[in-house]
Amino acid sequence: MNKDFSIIKYFPEESVPEKLKKRILNRIMVIKFRPLIYLFAAGLIIHLGFLSNHIYRLSLETEVLAVIKVMVTDFELSSDYLLNISAGLKEILPMFSIYLLIINLALVSLMIKLFKHFNSELL
Amino acid sequence: MNDNFDTNLLIAAQKGNLKAFDALINFYQTPIYNHLYRLTNNKDDAADLAQETFIKLYKTRERINADDNFRSYLYKIATNTAYDWFKKKKRHPEDLIIDAPDDYFETIEAKQSYYEVERLELIGLNMAMDKVKPAYKNILFLYYQQGFTYEEIGEIIGSPLNTVKIGLHRAKKELLKHFE
């Protein structure tokens, strides 16, 4: 009886979808780089938090500058006074957001380089 | 691909060599995809299940013993992945099991001669195969198309040797029933 069913091995084979292997390898890449992806996401969230704070402060500065302009125009304040105010405003700029932006850009370029490196090894 | 080649690639993949894993995918994606397509009758589902099979293989690669039969292990993952898919699709649970062995094992007496069976059209048999329940289809393809032994099939489907033999016997009977 075994002989009779050996015809089963001649059932036609289907060709594998073209992108199947690529899908598999992409998923493996995500698994492999998962810690780095989480780190980058956390860094990006923190950076966005500081950036929004920075934008908020800038908007405050704009309002302050508008008020100063009115004060200068309407009340004829001295230029020394204005210089002191602008020096103070510069201190408001949060350096943290700039540092975080640099770190995140470095992480992004590192991830891109690693992806390219492993992709070129496999292709 | 002989066992040594499989073992060498597996050991390299376990050490993190992606090229070795890539080579394993290259060799096994076609038979695994076809096996899953035979079980599911759907190309998209077969592709999804094949992807899932290789991802599971990657995640569990370090747990595989290099002395074990890698091919059987891979087909075991594929079969279990397909069965999970059947359960999610809410297929009838009895489609996934091989009936319990009877106390009396009936030997098959060929009702048709060897030459009559030879006249079976490949397409007709293919159509009949679509009506066979997945558990039996699985055994038929593992035995006749992939060339696994009874012991290896037992490892793949997690059943004892006697159950595999009975399952194959019943699978052939069911296939003939749908063909006639």
Image (cartoon, rainbow, N blue to C red):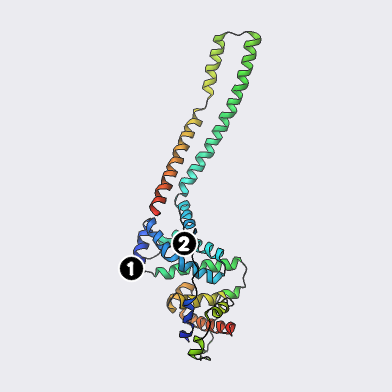
The answer to whether residue B66 is left or right of residue B112 is left
Query: What residue sits right under mark 2 in the picture?
Result: B54
Kindly identify which numbered label has been placed on residue B17: none
Is the residue A51 above or below the residue A13 in the image? above
Report the quarter where the C terminus of chain A lies: bottom left
Disc 2, disc 1: CB below 8 Å? no
Depth check, front residue: B170 or A95? B170
Q: Amino acid at mark 2?
A: Phe
Residue at the spot x=64%, y=12% of the render?
A71
The answer to whether residue B12 is left or right of residue B119 is left
Q: Residues within 10 Å of mark 1 (few under 14, many from 20)?
A: few
Instruction: Determine the residue located farthest toward the right in the rendered image.
Output: A74
Q: Amino acid at mark 1?
A: Asn
Q: Chain of mark 2?
A: B
Residue at the spot x=43%, y=75% of the render?
B152
Badge 2 or badge 1: first in the primary sequence = 1
Residue at the spot x=49%, y=30% of the render?
A98
Q: Secondary structure at mark 1?
A: helix
For the residues labelled 2 and 1, the Cα–Cα distance comes to 20 Å
Is the residue A31 above or below the residue A70 in the image? below
Q: Position of residue B149 (x, y in %)?
A: 42, 78
Q: Secondary structure at mark 2?
A: helix
Depth check, front residue: B71 or A119? A119
State the count of labels.
Answer: 2
Query: What residue sits right under mark 1 in the picture?
Result: B4
